[in-house]
C-alpha cells in the first residue's frame, strides 16, 4: 500500500497547491478570467479548469473505478495539447468560452478536490508518480496564470491593477557586477532521479565545460537603458538575423511593458499598474533575441545551460535572500534589486528566468514516457531556448538547479531576464 | 421654443429605448458582455457604453455647460469610428477591456440617463435633431448587440442559450411563392425629410423602373436546402467571381450557424440554442454572395433597392402580422413562417433584412453633414450592398420603407435573407 | 454564307490587331516577358498566349473540324478564369512558367494565325460574333500588357526603359478648368446593339439625371500636387472609410510611380524611365479612393457613369485632337496636356480612364450569355467601380461612349484618372 | 610576398570554380535564370551575380587601388545579407529583376574574372584568406543554384528537364542496414585551423559521447514508403509539436517533389524531369520534422552532430565510391543506391545532407570575425538545425567532416536526408 507518510505529505501539498491557485485569482472578475489576450496566453479560467482536468483525467478517471466526470464536455474544452486524449478546443479560441463561468469553474475545482480527498488513500502506488506530476503541473500553471493576466491587463488602456503594490515607496540600490569563474573540464549535469523532476531534466550525464565566468548578478534595468541609449535596438550588428527581422517587423524599441513617458524616462506595467522602473532590479520581459543582442553589445555572451546548472548545483533555491518564492507570501510579484543576496552568484533563483544560449533539445539517453503524459515535454524540443533559475512568479518549492524552462526566442511575456557570461 | 409636446415624446422615447437596451442584456454575465468573437462584432459591454458615449458627447458635452464626463478615458474606449472625435481604442481589441465591468458600464448608463433627464428641458432646439439621431443610433446597436451575442455564443462548443425558446413546439406551414408585378417608369424614392431618417436615405429623387416582379415572400429554409442538394455551393457558374473565391477559401457549404446533424437534416443555432430548422421560415444568415448565387440558380435576380422601396412605400412596417418588432415583446428573436401575413408582398418588414442588388452609394444630391456626425454614413459608401426591410431583431419603430442598411457582400452574421425578383 | 465584305474586313482587322500586339512587345527579353510583378498583373508571355488560346478555343476548336491544338497543355496554362473550360494554372503562379519561352509563344501565335487564315472563309456565321469578341478581347489585353510591363519595370531599381521617349523636351501648357452643364431628366444610356459591344454595356435603357456639371478636363498633376501639399493624404475627413484604411496600411502618400526627388519636386516612372512630372497632363495611376478623396477635398464629387456617358454620346473617340489612340502610332504612351483639344469636354477619350462614382453592377435586363463566354463580364459585378473613356494605352478602335471598364477601388496600375463633377 | 606556389594553386582553383559555375547554367534561358520560385530560393542570375559581387567587393574594391566597379548599382542588387555593406534589394523581390539580362550578368562575371587575373599577383597576403573564402562561397552557391532551379522547374506544370538523364535505365539494388558502434567518452570535434574552414566549424574542442550506434547507410525511398503506408504522416505521436502543426497547415503527405501516380506508386521530380522513385537510393527532400518523425516511428533517433563528425573524421570525402562530387563530372545530380560503397558507414559524403538532432549554435569559444565577413555564419545561429556530410549537388573539394550546414526545420528543397542513430 505505498500510501504511508510520503503520501500524507503529498495530500498536504495537494491542498496547499490547490489553495494557492485559488488565492492567486482572488479579485479577478468573471470577465478578467475569461478573456485571452493573445494566442500565447490562456484565460485564467482555462488555467483553473485545465489543471483540474489533468487531475480528473490522469488520477480520477484512470484510477478510480466508477468515477463520473463533472461534465463530459470539459475534456474537449480544457485539454491543452495531449493528442492522445482526443480532439480539443482550438487554442486561439480559448477566450470565446464565456460559459462555464468563473464561479462554475471553481465548483468544478471543488468537485475534483473532494473526489481526490476521498480517493487518495486508495490510489495505487503508480498513480502517485502522476500525482506528483499533477502538483508540478499545477505550479507551472500558477506562474503562467500570473504572466497571462499581466499581459491581459497591460492591453487595457485603463491599466488596471490586480494588486495594490509598493513599487513607489521602495528605493533600490546598486550592486556592482563581478565575474565569477565557473568549473572546467568534465562535469555532470542533469537530474539523477532522486525526487521529482520533469522527464527532460535527465538523464544525468557528463559534459565538458571550457574556461568561463558568469556575472555575479543579472543585467539590471539601469544597464538596459544604456543599451537603448547607445542605439542597441537600431544596430543590426548586435542581433541574430531572425532577431533583427523581429525587431523591424514588430517595431521593438524596448522590453515588453516599457513606456517612455519622457525622453529617457521609462515606466513599466506591473501587476500593480504603471510605475517608474526600479533601476537596479533585473531587467525582465525580454526575448532571447534581445538578451543575445545585449550580450553581444556588452562584448559577452549568454551562458550555456550546462555552465548555469554547474554553478547552481549546490544552491538552495527556496530560500532566496531577497525576492523569489513570493507566490507563497503576500508581497509584490516583480524582481527586486540584489543587495541582500550574499551569495557570490546572486539572484540565481526567484528573480527572473535567465535565457541561456542552449537550444532546448533532449539530453543523451532521453526517452519520452509512453502514453499521453509522454507528450509533456519531448515534443516541444525544436525551435526553443532553455531558461534557467526561476522567477518572482515561480512558486516556492518548484525551483531546482536542473529545471529546464523553454520558450521561443521571440517570446517575452514571462519574467525573462539574462545573466552575462564570458570565456576566460 | 421647440421643446413642446414633441420634446416630451422624445424623452418618453428616450426612456423606452434606453430601458429596452438593458432588458436585452438581462441574463448576460460580465464575461458574456466582455468578449469579442470576431473583428466584425463588438462586445455587449462596448455596445452599452458606446451608445451612452454618443449621448454624453453630442448631447451633454456639446449642449450642457459645465457637464463633467463620467470618466475621461471612456471617450477613448468607446468612440467607434468618428475620426473627428480623436484617437480611439483599436476595433479588434475591444474584447480585451475586462474593466470597466458590466456593472460599472450600467452605472455609466444611469449617470448619463440622469443628466439627460435633468438637461432635457433646457436643450436647444438644434440639439433635438441629434437627440432623435441618438435614439435611432441606439436602436441600431440593439440589433447589433443581439447578432453579436448570437455569434459569440455560437462559437462556444457548449452552445449556451441566451433565452429559453419555443422553436421545437412550433409547427410552421408553407406559403406558396407568387410573383407580384412592380411599378414601372419614373417613380420617386428616397426620404422626403418629413420625420426622422438617416442622411443617406435622401434626397427624394426620380428613378426609372423597368418591368419587373417581386416574389411574394422571402426564400425559405426548405427552398435553400434544395439549392444545397442540387450542388449549389459546388458549381461556380452560379457565383460572382469574388463569391466563388470566398466559398472556396472559407469552405462555405451552408448558411452561417447551420449544422448537418445527419445527411440532409440540418439544425441551426439560435438565441435559444441548437434547433432543427423551421422549414418554411425565411432563410437567414446568408451573405450577398450566397443570395446572388441562389437567385442565379433559380433563374432570377435580386431586386434593386428602388424596386424594393417602390413596392414597400405604402406599408406600415411596425405592425407586421407575424414576427418582427419583437424587440418590444417577449418572444423569440428569429424569423417565422408567413401564413398570417395577408399582404400581397409578405414579410417585407420584421423577418429578415433582404439583400438587394444595389451597391451602397449616395443618392443624387447627397451631402454628408459637417462635423463628426457627418461620418455617420457617407464614408462607408464603397464596397457594400444595400439591404432593405428590417429583421426580427430590428426594434419596433425603427423600420421604414426608405431605410438603407448596408453590409459587405461576405458578411452574414446579421439576420440577412433574400426575396427573388425577375424581369417581365 | 455570311462571309461577305464584313468578313473580309474582319480578317483585315484580325491581322492588324495581331500584328499590333507583337509590335508592342518588340524589345522585350524572354525574362521581361516571363515575370509577374504582383497578383493583379500577368506576364507579357501569358497575355500573348492567353489571347491566342482564346482564338484557338472558341474559333478553331469549336468551329474547325479536326483542328489539332498546338499543345494540349496550353489550355491549362493559358485559360484565365473560364470555369466552364476546366481547371487552370493558379493566377499568382503565372510568373513561374519560364517554359515555353517567348520565342515558342510567338510560334504558337503564328500557328494559330495560319489556321485562322485558312479557316476564315469557312467559319459559320455564328462564329463571327465570337470572332469580333476575340478582336476586342485581344485589344483589352494590349492595354493590360502595357500597364503590366510598366509595373514590372517600375519594381526594378535600375528603372529600365521600354522605349526611348520625349518627355523631357516637351513643354506642357495649362488649360483652365471650366464647368460644362450636363443633360437633365430622363435620358438613355447603354448600348443599343448596333455594332460590337461587350454584354455589360446593354441593354439601352432610361435613367434620370439630376442637374449637374462636369469639369471641362481631367484633374492635372499640378492640381494633385496642391492636394498633397494641403495634407490630402493625412486627413481622414476626405476619405472613404475603406480608403483611409488602405492609405494607412499601405503608407500611401502619392499616386503610384511618383517619387519625391526633392521636397515638393516629383518625378514619375513611365515606359521610358523616370521623368519629371508633366504639370498640366492629367494625373494618372490613382485609385478610386484617391479620386474620391480629391473630389471631396475640392468640394465636388465624381460623375456617375450615366452623366459621363450622356455627355460623351456624340463624340468620336478615335480622333482625339491630342493624345489617345496612340497604340497604332509610334509616340510615347502617357497622357498629355489638353491645349489642342477644342471640345468643350476635353480629353474624354485616350488620356486616362476616368473613375466614376458608379459601382459596376448590371444594367436593367442584363443577362449573361450561356456557356464559357458568359463568364466574360457578369461574374465580376461586385466590389468594383466603373471607369469611362479610355486611356493613352487603349488601342484605337476600342473606345466608345458606352464602354464600361471596371476595377477594384484600390487598384491603380492602369492609366486611371478623374474628372470632377458637381450638382447644380 | 606571399604569392608563391599556394597562390598559383589558388588562381587555378579560381578558374576551375568560376568555370564550373557557368557550366552548371548551360542550357538555361534568360527567363529560367530570372524567376524566383519562393522566398527561400534565388534566381540563377542572382547567384551568378552575387558571388561575383563578393569577389568584386572583398577582393577588388578592398585591395586593388583605383578599381572601378562594373556597375555601381550592382552592390544594391546583389548584396545578399551583409548589413555592414549597406542597403540592398529586398530578398523576396529578387525575381523582379529582368534587367540586367543573363547575358549581361555573364559579362559582369568575365569583367571581374579579368580584373582578378590581372590583380592576383599583387594581392596582399591578407587578401588571400578572403580569396579562399570567395572560392568556398561560390561553391556553396553552386549547390543552391541547382536546388533553386530544381524548385523552379518543379512548379511548372510542363515539368521541364534541365538535363537529359539516366534514371530509367538504372536498376538499383538494396543494401541491408546495419548498426555501427560509435566512439564513447571524451572526443574532440571541430576544425583545428589547418586548411580552410568556415568560422563556425571551430574552435576544436572536447565533447562527451554516450554509447551509441549509427546506421550503416541513410534511410532509403523504399523504407520511407513503408512509413507513409503505416500512416506516418497522419499520426501525431511521431511528430515534434511544431512539425505536426506544419504537416497539418501545409497538407504534407510525402517528401517534396513526390507524386503518387497510382496508389502506392510514387514518382518524383528530378533535374531531368519526372521519374519513378529509385527504391534503394537515399530518401531526399525531407524536412527536419519529417526526419525526426521517421526516426521516432522507427524507434530510433537522429545522430548528434558530434556523433556524426566523430564517425566521419577519418574519411576522404572527395572520393565517394558511388555518387557525390558529381558536380565536376557529367552525370545526373541525384542520390544513388549504396552497393559500391565498401565503407562500414556508407554514403557519408556526396549523397544527401544528413539532418542531425543538433541545433545550430556556436561552439565554445566561437567569435564572429569583425566586419562584413563576420556576418557570414554567426548571426544565423537561432532556430536552425545542423546537417552533415554533403549531397550529390555539393561540389567536389567542398566537403569535409567538420562542415556544418544548417537550415530551418521545415525547409526541404535541399538534397536533405537522414541516417538513423540509437543509444546502446
Image (cartoon, coloured by chain):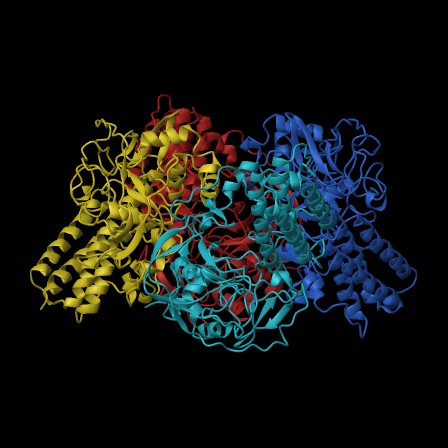
Chain colours: A cyan, B blue, C red, D yellow
* Residue C3, horizontal then vertical, whole percent: 41, 28
Q: Can you see residue B305?
A: no
Furthest-right residue in view? B5
For the residue pair C7 and D31, the one nearer the viewer reads as: D31
Q: Quadrant of residue B180?
A: top right
For the residue pair C337 and C90, the one nearer the viewer reads as: C90
Q: Give the position of the N terminus of chain A as an image quadrant.
A: top right
For the residue pair D192 and B290, the one nearer the viewer reads as: D192
Q: Quadrant of residue B244?
A: top right
Q: Give the position of the C terminus of chain A as an image quadrant.
A: bottom left
User: Can you say whether D171 is above or below A89 in the image?
Assistant: above
Q: How many marks?
A: 0
* Residue C330, horizontal then vertical, whole percent: 33, 53
For the residue pair B212 and B378, the one nearer the viewer reads as: B378
Q: Can you see residue C104?
A: yes
* Residue B335, horizontal then vertical, whole percent: 77, 37
Furthest-left residue in view? D5
Q: Residue at x 75, y 62 (%)?
A: B54
* In the image: residue D48, left or right of residue C130: left
User: Can you say whether B74 is above or below A205 in the image?
Assistant: below
Amino acid at each position: 500500500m505505498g500510501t504511508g507518510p510520503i503520501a500524507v505529505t503529498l495530500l498536504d501539498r495537494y491542498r496547499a497547491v490547490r489553495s494557492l491557485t485559488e488565492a492567486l485569482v482572488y479579485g479577478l472578475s468573471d470577465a478578467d478570467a475569461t478573456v485571452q489576450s493573445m494566442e500565447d496566453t490562456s484565460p485564467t479560467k482555462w488555467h483553473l479548469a485545465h489543471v483540474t482536468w489533468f487531475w480528473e483525467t490522469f488520477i480520477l478517471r484512470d484510477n478510480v473505478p466508477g468515477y463520473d466526470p463533472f461534465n463530459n464536455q470539459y475534456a474537449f474544452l480544457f485539454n491543452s495539447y495531449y493528442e492522445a486524449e482526443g480532439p480539443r478546443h482550438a487554442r486561439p479560441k480559448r477566450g470565446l468560452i464565456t460559459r462555464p463561468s468563473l464561479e462554475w469553474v471553481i465548483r468544478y475545482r471543488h468537485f475534483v478536490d473532494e473526489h481526490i480527498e476521498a480517493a487518495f488513500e486508495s490510489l495505487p502506488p503508480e498513480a502517485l508518480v502522476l500525482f506528483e506530476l499533477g502538483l508540478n503541473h499545477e505550479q507551472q500553471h500558477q506562474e503562467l496564470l500570473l504572466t497571462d493576466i499581466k499581459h491581459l491587463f497591460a492591453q487595457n488602456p485603463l491599466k488596471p491593477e490586480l494588486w495594490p503594490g509598493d513599487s513607489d515607496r521602495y528605493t533600490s540600490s546598486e550592486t556592482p557586477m563581478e565575474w565569477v569563474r565557473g568549473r572546467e573540464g568534465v562535469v555532470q549535469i542533469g537530474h539523477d532521479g532522486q525526487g521529482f523532476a520533469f522527464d527532460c531534466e535527465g538523464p544525468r550525464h557528463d559534459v565538458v565545460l571550457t574556461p568561463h565566468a558568469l556575472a555575479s548578478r543579472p543585467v539590471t534595468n539601469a544597464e538596459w537603458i544604456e543599451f537603448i541609449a547607445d542605439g542597441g535596438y537600431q544596430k543590426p550588428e548586435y542581433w541574430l538575423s531572425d532577431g533583427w527581422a523581429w525587431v523591424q517587423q514588430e517595431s521593438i524599441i524596448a522590453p515588453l511593458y516599457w513606456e517612455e513617458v519622457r525622453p529617457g524616462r521609462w515606466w513599466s506595467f506591473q501587476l500593480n499598474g504603471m510605475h517608474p522602473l526600479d533601476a537596479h532590479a533585473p531587467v525582465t520581459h525580454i526575448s532571447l533575441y534581445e538578451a543575445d543582442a545585449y550580450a553581444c553589445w556588452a562584448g559577452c555572451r549568454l551562458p550555456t545551460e550546462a555552465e548555469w546548472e554547474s554553478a547552481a548545483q549546490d544552491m538552495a533555491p527556496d530560500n532566496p535572500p531577497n525576492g523569489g518564492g513570493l507566490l507563497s507570501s503576500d508581497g509584490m510579484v516583480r524582481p527586486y534589486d540584489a543587495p541582500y543576496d550574499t551569495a557570490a552568484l546572486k539572484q540565481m533563483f526567484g528573480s527572473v528566468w535567465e535565457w541561456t544560449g542552449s537550444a532546448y533539445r533532449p539530453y543523451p539517453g532521453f526517452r519520452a514516457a509512453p502514453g499521453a503524459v509522454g507528450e509533456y515535454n519531448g515534443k516541444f524540443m525544436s525551435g526553443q531556448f532553455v531558461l534557467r533559475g526561476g522567477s518572482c512568479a515561480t512558486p516556492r518549492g518548484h525551483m531546482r538547479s536542473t529545471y529546464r524552462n523553454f520558450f521561443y526566442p521571440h517570446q517575452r511575456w514571462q519574467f525573462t531576464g539574462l545573466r552575462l557570461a564570458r570565456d576566460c
